[in-house]
Image (cartoon, grey):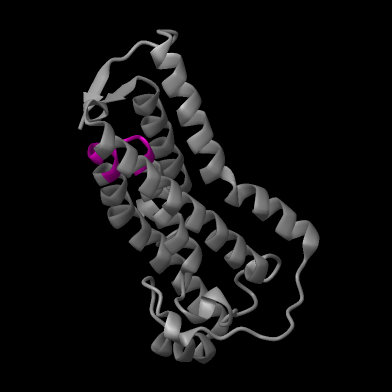
């Protein structure tokens, strides 16, 4: 589509490429912080908590947005506390996965990637919402934070129509964070049994 930046046109590919690169790195990675058992355990525990929060948060967002994305302006539930709660909870989950590797290096790389990549994604999506909803989106944007939630603004309806078939698919997507932690634990066990070699040692 003419007029869009390279990042906007290739954002899914770039995201998938980053995930694959991180996956390969983690597959052959050992944390130097494992020598400091308490530090490693604290990092993993915090990571697990963030993954849990992210999973519940993404399910909460999916409950409201499934079947309504783009052509219905959602401004209640998680979308009343910020305009991009799905990305916010994904950010928490990604940091959680980084900490679950028991390394600070991977965590910093993930934060840097999100900080550079997702502003382009958010701006592109909000531009589309602005073109579809016009003044309604402008009023919503004026009173609702873009990324960091303000939970004092939370507004939830008594009733809300959910589309179960669409929600079910998104629910499985939200669980990926939990599954990845499980896969990382399996990889760590395979390292201990020398099934997978270790090439990288990071703090």
Number of numbered markers: 0
User: At 49% across and 56% down in the image, what residue appears?
Assistant: 54
User: At 29% across and 44% down in the image, what residue appears?
Assistant: 107
- Secondary structure of the magenta portion, mostly? helix
Side of 43 relative to 97 (left or right): left
Say if the magenta span includes residue 114: no
Say if the magenta span includes residue 103: yes
Question: Magenta region: which residues?
Answer: 99-107
Residue 3 point in image, percent of width and height: 40, 62
Q: Which residue is situated farthest in the top direction here?
A: 194
Asked if residue 190 is positioned above or below residue 54 in the image, the reply reads above
Asked if residue 195 is positioned above or below residue 64 in the image, the reply reads above
Frontmost residue, 164 versus 133: 164
Frontmost residue, 61 versus 103: 103
| Residue 169 in sight here | yes
Frontmost residue, 197 versus 109: 197
Residue 133 point in image, percent of width and height: 56, 83
Frontmost residue, 60 versus 141: 60
Query: In the rendered view of the protein, which quadrant contains the C terminus?
Result: top left
Residue 193 point in image, percent of width and height: 43, 9
* Residue 28 location, quadrant: top left
Asked if residue 25 is positioned above or below residue 164 in the image, the reply reads above
User: At 51% across and 37% down in the image, what residue appears?
Assistant: 180
Residue 36 point in image, percent of width and height: 22, 31
Asked if residue 68 is positioned above or below residue 39 in the image, the reply reads below
């Amino acid at each position: 589509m003419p007029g869009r930046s390279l990042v906007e046109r290739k954002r899914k590919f770039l995201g998938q490429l980053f995930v694959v690169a991180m996956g390969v790195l983690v597959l052959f990675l050992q944390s130097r912080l494992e020598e400091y058992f308490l530090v490693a355990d604290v990092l993993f525990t915090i990571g697990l908590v963030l993954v849990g929060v992210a999973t519940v948060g993404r399910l909460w967002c999916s409950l409201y947005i499934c079947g309504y994305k783009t052509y219905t302006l959602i401004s209640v539930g998680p979308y009343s506390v910020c305009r991009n709660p799905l990305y916010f909870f994904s950010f928490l989950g990604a940091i959680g996965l980084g900490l679950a590797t028991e390394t600070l290096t991977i965590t910093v790389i993930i934060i840097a990637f999100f900080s550079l990549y997702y502003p382009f994604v958010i701006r592109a999506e909000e531009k589309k919402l602005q073109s579809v909803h016009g003044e309604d989106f402008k009023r919503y944007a004026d009173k609702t934070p873009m990324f960091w939630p303000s939970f004092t603004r939370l507004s939830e309806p008594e009733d809300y129509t959910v589309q179960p078939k669409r929600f079910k698919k998104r629910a499985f997507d939200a669980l990926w964070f939990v599954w990845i932690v499980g896969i990382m634990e399996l990889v760590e066990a395979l390292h201990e049994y020398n099934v997978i070699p270790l090439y990288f040692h990071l703090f």
